[in-house]
Image (cartoon, rainbow, N blue to C red):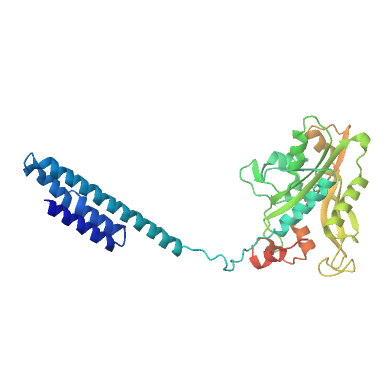
Amino acid sequence: MKEKLDNIKNQVNQKVKELKDMQSLNELKVKILGKKGELTEILRGMKDLSPEERPIIGNLVNKVRNEIEEVIKNAEDLIKEKELERKLEEEKIDITLPSSKIIRGSKHPINRTIEQIQDLFVSMGYDVVDGPELETDEFCFERLNLPKGHPARDMQDSFYITQEVLLRTQTSAVQARVMLANKEKSPIRMICTGKTYRREDDATHSHQFNQVEGLVIDKKERNVSLADLKGTLQVFVKEMLGNNLDLRFRPSYFPFTEPSYEVDVTCFKCCGKGCNLCKQTGWIEILGAGIVHPNVLKMNGYDPDQYGGFAFGTGIDRLAMFKYGITDMRYLYTNDIRFLKQFDRKD
Ligand code: PHE
């Protein structure tokens, strides 16, 4: 029996030296200590021993078992350490290698233009407000003095979702929202930028575009006048398009302003001499504007005898095109990276 135990011990001591990985170690464990292992076999044979022999051999078996377990445990630690070392070696990162280039995005020209407009008007004390793109007929038209059946509705082809809900055709809808939400009926000085939608299907128009709306309302005695509107738009246009440009106000019609104007700016391509961009007129139409119609004030909770003001609106996409010399509107919407990359710079 003792001989057998010594054999097993020697065998383990020998094998342990040859172990390469956890798998061969586990195999050895099973072979010796497992259910059908050699040492377990000996323990099972103990029942055939005489009562005198049993404690002696039992002691011996336990001693050998402890020794073997210790040897195996040490081998296990060694293997684990080696495996860790191998892994660390394999996964070593060479920090001296050159890094891969990080490609930086750039702001879209429309967003750049929007931010510039917002910064300018904030600097003049305006609030920047937001409104829903999915708008009701009430706010997009009715509260702007455009009742159902009004012929001026034909000026803007609309995408209706239901009879009452549509994609807003103009940010003017936000005028009514701001006036109505202002419970104290205090003075208003706001701009709103955002997406608008019209059913246009010719090559120079997109069904979705961006507008900026401006609205100023104050007490009658503060006398917010056409002169203020002109001055404001002058600052706006000069900041956006350049200093040496003139503005021209042409009488026009919008249901929510009276009087109404279309505002032209000197053609910045030919400086007013006449070219293909301005169709030889020397002027380019850029804005709609006017003095807020008394009906609009009344419908949205402002007494037209006590309050007055001006409003203006313009397409941001066209402004961006003029500002950056973009010749085709489709460039703004096709997300061609070669086009967008050109705006990866400060203004
Ligand atoms: N909402 C008008 C348009 O889309 C522009 C406008 C705004 C005109 C405010 C007058 C006052 O054409």
**Quarter of the image holding residue 286?**
bottom right
Q: In this view, does 311 lie above or below 280?
A: above
Residue furthest top in the image: 184
In what quadrant of the picture does the C terminus appear?
bottom right
Image coordinates for residue 310, horizontal then vertical, percent: 86, 43
Position of 193 with respect to 8 (left or right) is: right
Q: In the depicted view, which residue is nearer to us: 95 or 129?
A: 95
Q: In the depicted view, which residue is nearer to us: 208 or 145?
A: 208
Q: Residue at x 87, y 57 (%)?
A: 238
Q: In the depicted view, which residue is nearer to us: 253 or 325?
A: 325
Q: Is residue 270 above or below residue 309?
A: below
Position of 2 with respect to 160 (left or right) is: left
Residue 251 seen from this side? no
Position of 161 with respect to 279 (left or right) is: left
Q: Residue at x 30, y 51 (%)?
A: 73
Q: Which residue is drawn at 8% across and 40% down?
A: 52
Residue 273 seen from this side? yes
Q: Which residue is drawn at 51% across and 63% down?
A: 93
Image coordinates for residue 217, horizontal then vertical, percent: 85, 38
Image coordinates for residue 92, horizontal then vertical, percent: 49, 63
Q: In the depicted view, which residue is nearer to us: 15 or 223?
A: 15
How many circles with numbers are drawn on the protein?
0
Image coordinates for residue 163, horizontal then vertical, percent: 63, 42
